[in-house]
Image (cartoon, grey):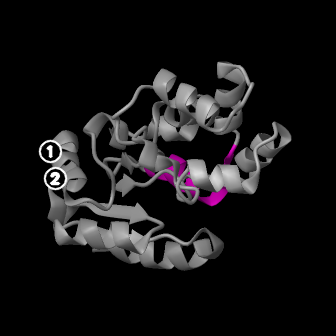
């Protein structure tokens, strides 16, 4: 069983990060221009192309910020909250010990280190396939190929839970079963999820 991280195991609330940038003088236009429409992944941090030091330095310079390195890192990390129905599910599955539990996530060193410190249930997962370590991002085919090898899974015996349809579709192309998660309808997810458990 393979879980995504953002908006599956933890809520991602970018707005909180943006508010902190605005409090430090960054305009909406500056933010959108620097992050290419708000997509900081294009800087290459989540795909492992640049280090944390390089990422923070680029952001401080590109956004014309006078924040300290740690202050920016803390602001960048302040966008997560627990999704309690999913944390409960992970704890239950771990206790039942019937399935191997894994993670496949587009994430960065700063975010992953913060999340694993703050949310202990994430550490209940056996092994992590992280975009910055695999030097690739979902939904590119290569990350699924690397994940299958890295986690040592049999695709046809594996279930992947992600919130984005394109990521689920890519996993299915590699023979992995999927359930697309909508955090606003956890009950609906549980019904579909239980069907797979009975197979």
Q: Name the residue under label 2.
A: 145
Residue 198 in the image: state x and y as whole percent: 33, 73
Quarter of the rendering occupied by the C terminus: bottom left
Q: What range of the chain is rendered magenta? A: 79-93
In reply to whether residue 169 is colored magenta, the answer given is no
| Distance between mark 2 and mark 1 Cα atoms | 7 Å
Residue depicted at x 79% and y 48%: 19
What secondary structure characterizes most of the magenta part? helix
Q: Answer left or right for 69 relative to 165.
A: right
Residue 92 to residue 128: above or below: below
Crowding at mark 1 (Cα within 10 Å: few <14, some 14-19, many 20+): few
Percent coordinates x, y for residue 29 in the rendering: 70, 56
Quarter of the N terminus within the rendering: bottom left
Q: Which residue lies furthest to the right in this view?
A: 23
Cβ atoms at labels 2 and 1 below 8 Å apart: yes
**Residue 25 as seen in the image, left or right of residue 53:** right
Q: Nearer the viewer, mark 2 or mark 1?
A: 2
Element assignment for label 1: helix
Residue carrying label 1 = 149
The residue located at (65%, 73%) in the rendering is 184
Q: Where is residue 139? Give x, y as percent.
A: 31, 62
Residue at the image point whose x is 27% and y is 40% from the top? 135
Q: Is mark 2 on a helix, strand or loop?
A: helix
Q: Position of residue 89 (x, y in %)?
A: 53, 56
């Amino acid at each position: 069983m393979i879980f995504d991280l953002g908006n599956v195991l933890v809520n991602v609330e970018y707005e909180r990060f943006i508010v902190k940038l605005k409090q430090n003088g960054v305009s909406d236009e500056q933010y959108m221009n620097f992050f290419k429409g708000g997509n900081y992944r294009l800087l290459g941090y989540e795909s492992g192309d640049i280090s944390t030091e390089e990422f923070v330095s680029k952001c401080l310079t590109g956004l014309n910020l006078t924040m300290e390195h740690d202050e920016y890192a803390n602001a960048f990390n302040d966008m997560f909250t627990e999704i309690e129905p999913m944390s409960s599910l992970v704890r239950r599955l771990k206790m039942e010990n019937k399935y191997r539990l894994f993670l496949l996530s587009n994430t960065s060193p700063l975010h992953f280190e913060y999340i694993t410190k703050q949310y202990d249930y994430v550490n209940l997962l056996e092994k992590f396939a992280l975009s910055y370590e695999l030097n690739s991002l979902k939904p590119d085919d290569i990350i699924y190929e690397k994940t299958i090898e890295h986690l040592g899974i049999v695709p046809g015996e594996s279930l992947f839970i992600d919130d984005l349809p394109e990521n689920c579709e890519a996993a299915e192309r590699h023979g992995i079963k999927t359930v697309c998660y909508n955090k606003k309808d956890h009950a609906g997810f549980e019904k579909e999820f239980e069907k797979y458990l009975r197979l």
